[in-house]
Amino acid sequence: MREADLPTVIAIEQRAYAFPWTQGVFRDCLLANHPAWVLVEDGAIIGYAVLSVAADEAHVLNLCTAPEVQGRGHGRRLLRALMQLARGRGAHRVFLEVRPSNGPAIALYHDEGFNEIGRRPRYYPARDGREDALVMALELLPEE
């Protein structure tokens, strides 16, 4: 992901989420040198992901595919790319937060080996106040 990609990324973010990240948040991630990738199909950005890696832990900060292409395996491709990236940067485990109301994302994370390890009360903004976050983690085993 580059600065020039941000208008397209923001447009997807706003279509996908009721409470989207701002351009400033994405820009801050780029300035902090967080690994950030876009997924391109037929020359168009259709998804993106942002990772934070510190010491031996990684944290999925954002992973999104455009609503019109969801359900086609693109999120899985992005997630697997992030796991490879985390391994390559020496991470032994990966964490993420997800809304309990986001069933498709939870199913993907479980399918890819993530386990629920906790809950952050009132973590996300919601229409009627705040929504908890499920905290999930994956141990990155050495590749065979």
Image (cartoon, rainbow, N blue to C red):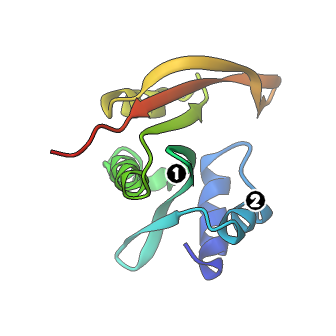
Q: Quadrant of residue 113?
A: top left
The location of residue 105, given as percent across then percent down, is: 46, 34
Determine whether the residue tagged by mark 1 lies in a helix, strand or loop.
Answer: strand
Q: Nearer the viewer, mark 2 or mark 1?
A: 2
Q: Nearer the viewer, residue 125 or 116?
A: 116
Which residue, given by chain and number where applicable, does mark 2 sit on?
25
Above or below 10: residue 58? above
Q: Quadrant of residue 4?
A: bottom right
Q: Earlier in the sequence, mark 2 or mark 1?
A: 2
Above or below 125: residue 26? below
Determine whether the residue tagged by mark 2 lies in a helix, strand or loop.
Answer: helix
**Identity of the residue drawn at 68% across and 62% down:** 29
In the displayed structure image, the side of residue 39 where residue 4 appears, left or right: right
Q: Name the residue type under label 1.
A: Cys
**Identity of the residue drawn at 60% across and 49% down:** 16
Q: Nearer the viewer, residue 61 or 15?
A: 61
Above or below 9: residue 144? above
The location of residue 11, given as percent across then percent down, is: 64, 64
Q: Nearer the viewer, residue 56 or 110?
A: 56
